[in-house]
Image (cartoon, helix red, strand yellow):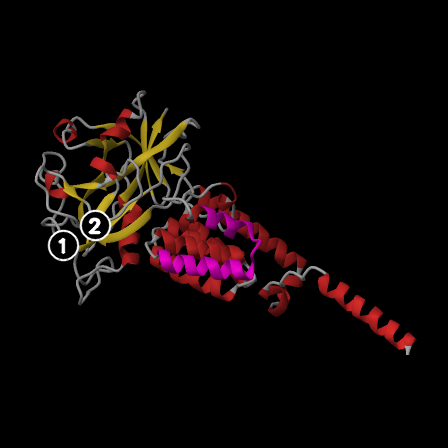
Amino acid sequence: MKRIAAACIALGLAGTQAFAQPATPPRSAASITDFRVNDPALMDARTALLRRAESELARGDAAAANESFDRAAMMLHAPDTEMGLVRTYLQAGQYRRALAFCAHTAGTHRESPSAGALYAWLLGAGGQGAFAERVLNETLERSPQDPVSLEVRRAFATPRPMAAGALLQTPHRLAPQAVMAPGQDAIPETARIVSSGVLIRDGTLALVPNAAVRSAPSGMLWVRNGLGQTTRARVDENSKVLEAFGVTLLRLDAALEPPPSLAVAPREPFAGSPGFAVEYAESSSAAPAWPWLSQGFFGALPSNGLRRLGIELADGPHGGPVLDAQGRLAGIALPGVEREAVMLPASRWQDLPGIATPTSAPDAASPAAPARPSGTLPADQAYESALRLALQVIALR
């Protein structure tokens, strides 16, 4: 009997030791379901294609990168390829396509927590904060020690998240690649993001807060959109008339592509009507980023040229575009008194000489403005437009 008891104790201890062993990391779906992962030559060719695609994306050739990622995807069904495609769609300005495909990637490749982190980031940037938190929480429940997801959690705890460090690594990179306009020198390392701005007219002009220009005593300024496209900018000769309202007019050395069928609101939004505000985080560097969209309701009508924005924004220099419920440009967000944002309505600048902007509404049959029975633009469509409309303003210290 003693020998039986001893044997039972030994078996129990062995079982405890076995149970205490660290869990085996989940195998990728590809290694389980796709025999091609065991073909070294094919995997080497795939790796070369992925490197080529990343290089094409870094120099701003989204079409070529898309083709290279597609070819790699035909070699193996894997999350790194799909995250590359998500970023390629974004760098082409196709947020809605990127968001839908990232939902597939995060849901299908649960063994890759960085795919879930990327999906959460895109949701948060596009104004779906509650859903973004849910996706991130579920990702961390499955992979509680994942460094990318933990970094996203820390970023989400800040007023305006900014990707840095591990979040800028591929394949999950949570920011666009910076692409300078042809013939322009790279931005100096001592430059920094000082505010947001608004691209206006045909993509040759931008409006920025006066404080952004004062942040550049050297006079050296650049602007960059959410696709990473970057150009040098200079104070325009027509700027004086607007400076009293707190904004400066910049002329871009190279035009940036404006959103398709962008319209300026024909009238100021009614107080209490819904709208969107889009802006970037300040940064001590000039790193590219995707903007963040906030939804809310417009405040009181103006009495002195400015109106209370009403849409809640994190403290900062502001300067980003404000859109009405139909996605039309309604104004620019500016700092107000007592840390409350105000809006300079577009009506204050759209008819000025050299700045006049088209006021016709988008064609309801066009892809950029599909028919909406409710008359309210979905947040994802507003964000897609804002990728080209909202600008990072960069100043040399």
Is 376 on the left or on the right of 87, as rendered? left
Image coords of residue 81 (percent x, y)? 51, 56
Can residue 205 be seen from the camera position used here? no
Pointer 1: what residue?
361
Report the front residue among 95 and 161.
161
- Position of 335 with respect to 157 (left or right) is left
Where is residue 132? Give x, y as percent.
40, 57
Q: Picture quarter containing residue 8?
A: bottom right
Residue 325's x, y, as percent?
19, 56
The residue at 34%/51% (across/down) is 93
- The N terminus sits in image quarter: bottom right
Task: Give the vertical position of 192 relative to 154 (above or below).
Answer: above
On the rendered structure, is 284 left or right of 380? Answer: right
Name which residue type carries label 1.
Ala
Look at label 2 and name its amino acid. Leu
Please name the residue shown 30% across and 21% down the image: 217
Packing grade of label 2 (10 A; few <14, some 14-19, many >=20) is many
Residue 323 — which label?
2
